[in-house]
Amino acid sequence: MCVDPGRAGESHPKRGVPMAIIEKEIELVGSRGRKRVRGLFDSGATYSCIGRELAEALEILTPLPEPMSFETAERGRTLEAREHVSLIFYIDGYRFSDEFMVLPGLSEEVIIGASTMQKWRFKLDFEREEVIIDPRATRLRFG
């Protein structure tokens, strides 16, 4: 998971249980290509993250102004992001976009974190293991 060290080990704010993940197929799209992957929607991850190899295959990496360290699900282990990418991604035919921190050594190809889920109003149904999308969040609005 891509967690700021200060948030590691938190419980779900409403349920008091450890934060959980849901796995779902998504399609990632960048200027260099596109790929279908199994994405982890992780309510305990602060940022969305992507493995370096996949990021390089999809988009040109952009250096961060300064490195960012992230704690993993394995207690005490941290990974450092020095680059990020901006990608489009599709879930169930709906198009979204966001920034992904590039993490060498990430155990998953891609993790969708809380900041992305909040931005696009995704809801996680842990009982049904589904990502619930509000189609209204995908509409472009002016004014």
Image: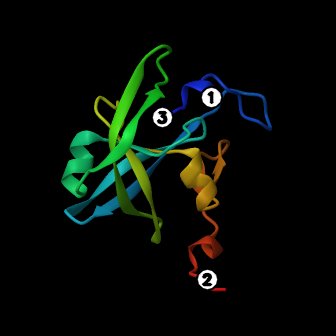
The relative height of residue 29 versus residue 7 in the rendered view (above or below) is below
Question: Which residue is labeled 2 in the image?
Answer: 141
- Rounded to the nearest whole Å, what is the CA distance between mark 2 and mark 1? 33 Å
Look at label 2 and name its amino acid. Arg
Cβ atoms at labels 2 and 1 below 8 Å apart: no
Give whichever of discs 1 and 3 has the lower sequence position: 3
User: Around disc 3, counting alpha carbons within 10 Å, would you say few (fewer than 14), some (14 to 19), or many (20 or more)?
Assistant: many
Observer able to see residue 116: yes
Q: Nearer the viewer, residue 28 or 81?
A: 81
Query: In terms of image quadrants, where is residue 86?
Result: bottom left
Give me the residue at 27% from left, 49% from top: 55
Give left or right: position of 34 versus 66. left
Q: Which mark is residue 2?
A: 3
Question: Which residue is labeled 1 in the image?
Answer: 7
Secondary structure of the residue carrying numbered label 2: loop
Q: Position of residue 118 (x, y in %)?
A: 63, 54
Observer able to see residue 122: no
Give left or right: position of 62 versus 74. left
Q: Position of residue 128 (x, y in %)?
A: 64, 47
Secondary structure of the residue carrying numbered label 3: loop
Looking at the image, the residue that sits furthest to the front is 65
